[in-house]
């Protein structure tokens, strides 16, 4: 199990002033070019290594076509 948390706790919003925080998620590398992300609530998405790197570094807002599906699936919480 991999749970990711970055920054100090801020009781009035997400850590470090970002507009979102990551939900609890699990990963499984399908092959060199595909990484499966899932949650306990049956949401899942397959990302390429570049998208996965953005996800881990809290940089998905740089790519709106990635941000919106992750928000809709509940992988990032706003």
Image: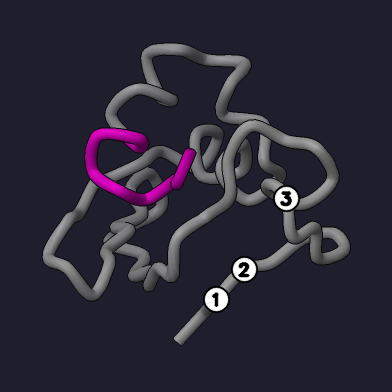
- The residue that appears at 37% across and 50% down in the rendered structure is 75
- Check disc 2 and report its element: helix, strand or loop: loop
Residue 45 badge: none
- Quadrant, the N terminus: bottom left
The residue identified by callout 2 is 4
Of 8 and 54, the residue lying toward us: 8
Q: Does 13 sit left or right of 7 as displayed?
A: left
Location of residue 26 by image quarter: bottom left
- The residue that appears at 58% across and 40% down in the rendered structure is 20
The residue identified by callout 3 is 12
- The residue that appears at 23% across and 43% down in the rendered structure is 73
Give the class, few, some or many, for how many residues have Cα within 10 Å of label 1's Cα (few <14, many ≥20). few
Distance in Å between CA atoms under marks 3 and 2: 19 Å
Locate residue 54, reporting x and y percent: 61, 36
Residue 23 highlighted magenta (yes or no)? no
Location of residue 30 by image quarter: bottom left
The residue identified by callout 1 is 3
Q: Do the residues labelled 2 and 1 touch (CB within 8 Å)?
A: yes
If you read the primary sequence from the N terminus, does the residue marked by circle 3 or circle 2 appear first?
A: 2
């Amino acid at each position: 199990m991999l749970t990711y948390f970055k920054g100090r706790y801020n009781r009035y919003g997400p850590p470090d002033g970002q507009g979102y925080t990551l939900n609890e998620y699990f990963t499984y590398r399908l092959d060199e070019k595909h990484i499966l992300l899932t949650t306990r609530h049956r949401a899942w998405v397959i990302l390429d290594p570049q998208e996965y790197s953005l996800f881990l570094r809290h940089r998905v807002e740089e790519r709106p076509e990635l941000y919106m599906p992750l928000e809709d699936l509940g992988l990032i919480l706003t």
